[in-house]
Image (cartoon, rainbow, N blue to C red):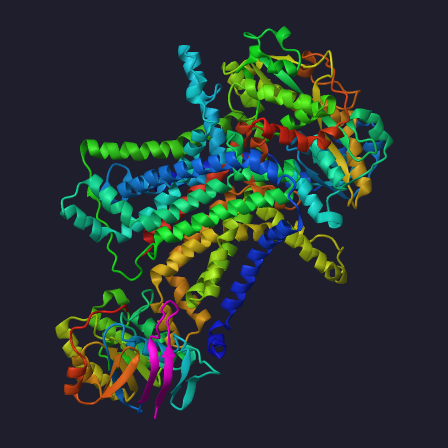
Amino acid sequence: MKKWFLLSLVLLLSILAACGNTEDSEEQADSTTDQEETEQSGESTESENEEAATEKIGGEVNLYTGRHYETDQELYDTFTEQTGVKVNVIKGDDDELIARLAREGEASQADLLITADAGRLYRAQSQDLLQSVDSDVLNENVPENLREENGQWFGLTKRARIIAYNKETVNAEDIQTYMDLTKDEFQDKVLIRSSSNIYNQSLLASMIALEGEEKAKEWAEGIVDNMARDPKGGDRDQAKAVVAGEGDVAVMNTYYLGKLINSEDPEEVKVGEQLGVIFPNQDSTGAHVNISGIGMTASSKNNEQAQALMEFLTTEEAQKQFAEANYEYPVNPNVEASELLQSWGEFKAQDINLAELGENNDAAIKIMNEVGWK
Amino acid sequence: MKLFRKLPGYANIWSWLSLMIVVLILMPNITILLNFFTEKAENWGHIQEFILPDLLKNTSLLMVFTGVLSILIGTSLAWLVSAYDFPMKRFFKWALILPLAIPPYIAGYTYNGILNYTGVIQTTLRNQWGIEVDQKYFDILTLPGAVFIFTLFLFPYVYTITRAFLANQSASIVENARLLGRNAWEVYFRIVLPISRGAIVGGVSLVLLEVLNDYGLVQYFGVPTFSTAIFQTWFGMNDLTSAIKLSATLMFIVFGILILEKVLRGRKKYSYASAKVRPLTPVRLKGVKAWTAFSYAFVIFSLGFLIPFIQLVDWMFLTFDKIASPEFTSLLTNSLLVSFVGAAMIVVFAVIIANFARMHQSIVSKSAARVTILGYSIPGAVIAVGISTVFIQIDQWLFGFYDWVGMDPTLVLSTSLFMLISAYVIRFLAIGYNSIESGFDKVGHQFTEASRMLGMNVTQTFFKVDARMIRGSLISGFILAFIEILKELPLTLILRPFNFDTLSTKAFQYASDEQIHEASLASIIIVIISGIAIYIFHQVLEKEPN
Amino acid sequence: MYIQIKDLCFRYGNSKMNTIRNFNLSVNQGQIVSILGESGSGKSTILRLLCGLETPSQGVISIGGKTVTDDRSFVLPEKRGIGMVFQDYALFPHMTVAENIQFGLKGFGRKAKKQRVEEVLDLVNMKDFSKRYPHELSGGQQQRIALARALAPKPSLLLLDEPFSNLDADLQIKIRSELRDIIKKTGITSIFVTHDREDSKAIADRIITMRDGSAYDWDSICTIKSEFPEEQPMTIS
């Protein structure tokens, strides 16, 4: 017994030792006076965007974010180096962060809210939790349909909800629209995750916006009829199920497929490579696109710093990093998507104001409940 | 008139502190319930028609099967380990508690990772022997799959409590039954199960409360239960009132379980306080029987700990270079800090209430004792909202004061660790309380009374006598609360201050984004620390004199 | 009168009937009184009420001229200065014999403490056992230590709850007279509770029998026999 105890202790210590090998982390987080370090990053930034890069503002900015990626933290660090503004972060679920913001009201310390879904931004907006930001930089960097018209929120990255198919069993010609998923030939062949997932809710919400509730409900019914199995797992699990032969087609977000193809696990890479990508509805309404985006809170007390960070995140430098690291599409039209995404080709996106995703979210959930989409 | 007589007995620090703690626990719950009356539930009809039937079905299936299976596994192992000697028994005695070190949702992700198409089993079959299997047989993302995970990772609650009972309380009854010529199976089913009813019910109700509270696992497995529905109506439909109605329905079920526990346990306590206890002498098993016993324990231990642990270690090596960073040192410190402070406060609070409750056998003290369970019975996210509402309100009252001491009138308390730790206390007080209450039960009143007759007041008596005598319970209460806080997720996620990450938020950050491989490092550290804590817990229990 | 109990009533939280009904008793200083009764007669409850471990619903108790319980006031047990020997002795298992005895000696200096411990150990003939732990002692030895511990702070009243119930029969007879000697030596007023008439006869100056929560004072043993039949069904204790 003693041996076990020692063994685990040694294991724990060795993990920690390995983690602590590199230099201390505290310094990176707390860098209000990092003037020397700006030189290192200076070369890559100066050319891109003067407004954000050169000015030293100082102070701090408080951020609630529903995005949990390592790369985001790197971007904040770069921002701190360039501007001297310390970025304080609370990561959480989109919904809970909004609920927290609402409870804190005027007194909230948060200056910025980032969520991984436009519907959520709309919800924050409709609860008067956000304020308008009028910035030429933002208006220029973010296309009109990916931001709220009054500047309440701005997209940072976008992702398309696509159909992934098994290259061996499916002829891509047969499945060109979301509606095709409900065709008889895909009876028991469709893989899609549960209705509690926001991406599915937003997809259905976009259909309600484009084609009306009745059509949307018909589609949802068709999907439920054609499901290969009860909805479960994440987007990656749907992809694996296609390759495993449980079904033929899966609905998933682009970046999950990107991550599969670039996984550490060679088996996952194999899965990714066996899948083909279809951008649906190219001849009609376009593929469903959602964003992760940012808005300044109504209670913000560090408006200048907050706006600087918003602007920084839409610069070409930052957008490039979003695109490369996380297989998302940059919103800044001057930045190219990652090579992998480019290999899937250009696509036409739904032409709706993303706020409509939020407006129709309730209706979408109710439809899903009514048709028995678990 | 009676009041004057009773007052001196109540007028001590224990009563006042108990009262304060009770108020602290009740406040967030009351804020939630107040909403119940102020707002109209727009979607309740819709929920009743389309969601509720499924919820009730899933929830009851999960509870019944997880309950029955954890009783079977928990008690049979407890019996095996207490009554027999077989190879490696001393190791299994505590190793069988280890599954508690792995949070069910991590276990769920891990098992799916093992069994799915790219998992080690199917990959080996496919690449080594070219065998393609039917996914049906490897699909764990189902209701039975959820039962499997819940059972394997929660049965130790039943196991631990039952074993403690059997080891100390059952010797004479069991030996009598043996002398009367009953065989092992008869003894187990006709003696062991019935006499340890109280302990079993106590353990299984903890299991069921955990099942009801779980969000991560059922959500990933696609088995909607109350907690997922509460989230969906609240956040998805933006209908707080319906969410609260669902919570209230859930609380109703919980109170049902608690009442059932009371009824089933009857007037029996976990232990017969002053009875002379004699440990059960184990029978040495030989040959096939010994190895059967060993295999059974080993299979459960492997499924509940070894296999997922090895898989996590494997994934850790896969992603170590990408993930490991100096940040983990601060994650570890943060986790240890909140777990330590939280568990310490839980023990202090639990002692105060437990001591108050046993000094005064009145309705007031009994209700105080019942209140401790409140936090454990409500989904974490619901508590989180209640707590932050209360703290924000307090902050707003204090704005004048902050101004007066020269601070900005902003949210101070509600953005501090203080709020998070209070939340832990409210949530896990029941765990500390149960352990300490049973400690007090075991000791009884006589030593306390003796001390008071020798001129010590309640507080002196507590420090000089009671605290020493229930030391084992204090330590095990601390350790159990420590492990729970270390694994805790929803409260930490939503109530933490800026720039504050813990191991469990880190694990969740990856897992929620379907990067289970990347989540393994943080998970493993949680598992190892919990494992060490469980080992210490076991040692404490073993040394405990009776 | 040294101890006065008037119209005492008491009921346990979970029972419907009063356990003690209008109980009256007066005791002279230095007297050894035995309360004799079967299980459930409420005799132990009287002791618990006297020392303040239970609160009566009505009635007055005064000890040494000081009122400890009436409608208006209630003195906490630790303030009453009463010594008690519990039925199962309740020696603190985590303390040695000496530490157990010292426990009640608040406000004594270090030397005075040591001296007092020796005195009482001497009194109960247990001088050589001061370093032992309770579980290293026999039943009779434990009882003597419990007595020493109760006597050490020089209480104004000594209560003994079934002092012999945990002892073997022959030991019981030996200790009875020893106990009376020790108590008489200190001259302390004592009340002890028992279900055994022989105990009462051997030790007490005066015997009270209790039935259904009330007291009957008897001085002659023959009356006890007729009024206190030997075989009666047990009631809840």
- The one of C5 and C235 positioned closer to us in this rendering: C235
Task: Indicate yes or no whether the magenta region holds residue C15.
Answer: yes
Q: Is residue A357 left or right of residue B1?
A: right
Q: Residue at x 26, y 35 (%)?
A: B293
For residue C181, what is the image quadrant?
A: bottom left
Q: Residue at x 42, y 15 (%)?
A: B133
User: Residue B503, percent across and down?
Assistant: 55, 39
Q: How many labels were placed on the picture?
A: 0
Q: Is residue C96 above or below residue A134?
A: below
Q: Is residue C57 left or right of residue A275?
A: left
Q: Residue furthest bottom?
A: C1
Q: Is residue B491 above or below residue A176?
A: below
For residue B64, what is the image quadrant?
A: top left
User: Residue B439, percent across and down?
Assistant: 38, 58
Q: Which residues are magenta?
A: C1-26
User: Residue A33, percent across and down?
Assistant: 75, 42
Task: Indicate yes or no whether the magenta region holds residue B494.
Answer: no
Q: Is any part of residue C80 visible from this angle? A: yes
- The one of A47 and A287 positioned closer to us in this rendering: A287
Q: Residue at x 68, y 14 (%)?
A: A279
Q: Is residue A21 left or right of residue A320?
A: left
Q: Is residue C105 left or right of residue A304?
A: left
User: Residue B126, percent across and down?
Assistant: 43, 13
Q: Is any part of residue A263 visible from this angle? A: no
Image quarter of the C terminus of chain B? bottom left
Q: Residue at x 32, y 48 (%)?
A: B197
Q: Is residue B306 above or below residue B179?
A: above
